[in-house]
Amino acid sequence: MPESPEPPAVGPQAHLKDPLVASVLAWLVPGLGHLYQGRYPKAALLFVSILGTFLYGLFLGSDQQAGWGRVVYFSFRQNDVRLYYLCQIGVGLPALPALVQADLVHRGKRPFCHALMAPPKLHAGDPPQPDPKNPDDPGQQTCGDVVRSLARFFELGSLYTAIAGLLNVLAIYDACCGPVLPEPAKDKDNGDETKPDGPKRKEEPAETPA
């Protein structure tokens, strides 16, 4: 009687610990959830690749006149709905200063750190008011000023930072649910379907002697 084929060997499963904690850590800092799970090579790869992509996008979206990291900011104002930020926030803590800066600007206060991730003004007369001690304050730049100053790097920086956030969403899923592994094949004796070995030859009836 022919033996049923043995199922292919499946590699060892990753120890995911607490998936919820790992997911939160993976969102806060790329690779931190995998570090918590003891998956050190993947943690290092995600940290360097995702955070490197995000920081490069910030670099592209920065200059002395426009301010630092002006491609990452939170704004859902009329005529300035920043949908990019919904992707950028996926990178976690590195994108959170944008929320702090948006709150400061909304309350009429000046943004900090050379307008890092601060939303630009819609109109030149909007708050915050100019600082007489700092006439070149980038917090006074309008949306049009920022786009003109950064030129094509405004869109490039926006794309790089958004891609980094979306990549970290995949990393969060991996930290929560683990790597996707193939299911082992099941034999026919248990009533499961398997891939046929090939077309079966039709048996010919045995000849009867004359």
Image (cartoon, rainbow, N blue to C red):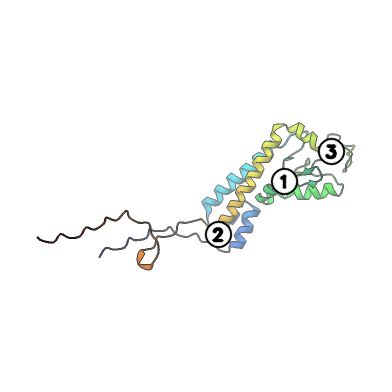
Residue assigned mark 1: 83
Residue assigned mark 3: 140
Q: Position of residue 57 (x, y in %)?
A: 66, 39
Secondary structure at numbered mark 3: helix
Q: Position of residue 70 (x, y in %)?
A: 74, 40
Residue type for callout 2 = Cys
If the image is split into quadrants, where does the C terminus sit? Answer: bottom left
Query: Could you tell me which residue is drawn at 39 percent across and 67 percent down?
Result: 191
Secondary structure at numbered mark 2: helix
Residue type for callout 3 = Gln
Q: Earlier in the sequence, mark 3 or mark 2?
A: 3
Query: Could you tell me which residue is drawn at 86 percent across and 49 percent down?
Result: 107
Distance (Cα) linking label 3 and label 2: 45 Å
Query: Marks 2 and 3: in contact by CB < 8 Å?
Result: no
Tell me the crowding category of disc 1: few under 14, some 14 to 19, or many 20 or more residues within 10 angstroms, Cα based: few
Q: Is residue 183 above or below residue 125?
A: below
Q: Is residue 122 above or below residue 204?
A: above
